[in-house]
Image (cartoon, grey):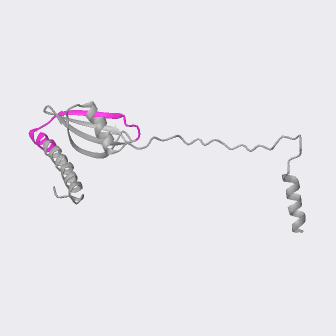
Amino acid sequence: MTTTLIAAALLFATPVPGTPAPTVSVPATSAPATAAPVTEAQAVEIAKARVPGATVGDVERDDEHGERTWEVELTKGGQEHEIHVSEQTGKIVKQDTDQADARDEADAGADARDEADDSDDARDEADDSDGADD
């Protein structure tokens, strides 16, 4: 009986000369293509382009108008800029500017110095790991 089933399957699976091959249609997916999320570093660069020469303060994730954003705080010329960059598109969805107080300016300067120190420490560690006497 098994031999009969296999023979029947082969008979029906073999195309008949002169007949069109069967076609199979696959439905297209309707899922929208999504952009890769914007990283924190990219959001900072986008915000700095909006306020050139500004010092970066705090950066954190936030929700703005129902959209996930990076909130980037910048300080320049006595003003504090709060830039909200969409995590999905990289577009600026909100910007606020306020008068910065002296403490904000000092905090932003300290943050910039900390970032520079961290970068210098990383270079020192890489230099120390090469085994050479410097």
89 lies left or right of 32: left
- Closer to us: 15 or 70: 15
96 is within the stretch colored magenta: yes
For residue 89, what is the image quadrant?
top left
Q: Hey, which residue is sitting farthest left in the picture?
A: 102
On the image, the x and y values in percent for residue 79 come to 16, 33
Please name the residue shown 28% across and 42% down the image: 71
The stretch in magenta equals: 88-108
The structure residue drawn at horizontal position 37% and vertical position 42%, both measured from the top left corner, is 38
Q: Which of 12 and 82 is in front in this view?
A: 12
Place of residue 92 in the rendered image (x, y in percent of width and height, measured from the top left): 33, 34
Q: Does 40 lie within the magenta span?
A: no
Quadrant location, the N terminus: bottom right
Q: Where is residue 91 in the image (x, y as percent from the top left)?
A: 36, 34
The image quadrant that residue 8 belongs to is: bottom right
Q: In the image, is residue 16 above or below residue 3?
A: above
Would residue 23 appear left or right of 79 to someone viewing this image?
A: right
Q: Which residue is drawn at 86% across and 62% down?
A: 6
Q: Which residue lies furthest to the front in this view?
A: 132
In the shown orientation, is residue 3 left or right of residue 96? right
Q: Which residue extends farthest bottom? A: 1
Task: Report the quarter where the C terminus lies.
Answer: bottom left
